[in-house]
Image: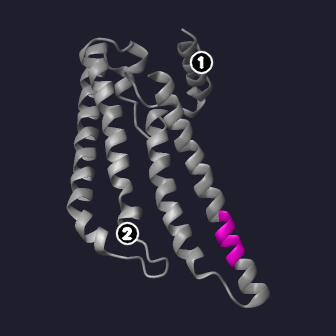
Amino acid sequence: MQRMIHLFFKLLELLIVVCLVAMVIMVFGNVVLRYTMNSGILISEEMSRYCFIWLTYIGAMVAMREKGHLGVDTLVRRLPVLGKKICLFLSELLMLMCNLLFFLGTWKMHDLQLTNVSPVVGISMIWIYGVGYVVSVVMSIINLHMLWKLLTGRIREEDLVVVVESEDVPDLATARASGAQK
């Protein structure tokens, strides 16, 4: 199961790279065409915008798994273990509620986005804004997994503070590598 999760997030990282490369090629190609031939590719502006939307949301999923989102942990680090557990529980519960609201909002806008067509490319806008389904489900699963680990007592004390300092990134990579070898 861990291997499938790892492969899923590697696929997401690959999609980030593909979106980024596609954006660079489309925007740079369009700039070159405009300056050299006084023309451009119409769909490149719209498609690069859509790639940016997907890149942002996919990056948010990867960052959540790697605990790379911004956070303030000044108070939480000073709390006793019970206080850290309560803060983690509330934090994960609030994020889960936000993800459920995000899913619900995407669901409510589904019919409108399904019939709404992009002006240049001509694709249904659900292909762009439907990323809300993917993001909300994946992040909700991560939240539920953390809550389950917390409620069953399977979380280590050092995992109670989910913010990773930039100086701690090498330590996190070492911890993950040693955890994967077990």
Q: In this rendering, is residue 125 above or below 161?
A: below
Cα distance between the residues tagged 1 and 2: 40 Å
Dominant secondary structure, magenta: helix
Which residue sits at x=25%, y=13%? 152
Residue 177 falls in which quadrant of the image? top right
Please tell me which residue lies in front, 7 or 80.
7
Nearer the observer: mark 1 or 2; the answer is 2
Residue identified by numbered label 1: 177
Q: In this rendering, is residue 103 above or below 124?
A: above
Element at badge 2? loop
Residue 109: % across, % down: 24, 64
Q: Is residue 69 visible?
A: no
The quarter of the rendered structure image containing the C terminus is top right
Q: Which mark is residue 125?
A: 2
The magenta region covers 24-30
Are the residues flagged by discs 1 and 2 in contact, CB closer than 8 Å? no
The quarter of the rendered structure image containing the N terminus is top left
Residue 122 falls in which quadrant of the image? bottom left
Residue type pointed to by label 2: Met
Which residue sits at x=72%, y=91%? 38
Q: Is residue 172 left or right of residue 138?
A: right
Q: In this rendering, is residue 95 above or below 86?
A: below
Please tell me which residue lies in front, 134 or 171.
134
Residue type pointed to by label 1: Ala
Q: Is residue 87 left or right of residue 6?
A: left
- Residue 26 in magenta stretch: yes
**Residue density around tag 2, few if under 14, some if 14–19, many if 20 or more, within 10 Å:** some
- Residue 17 in magenta stretch: no
Residue 74: % across, % down: 40, 30
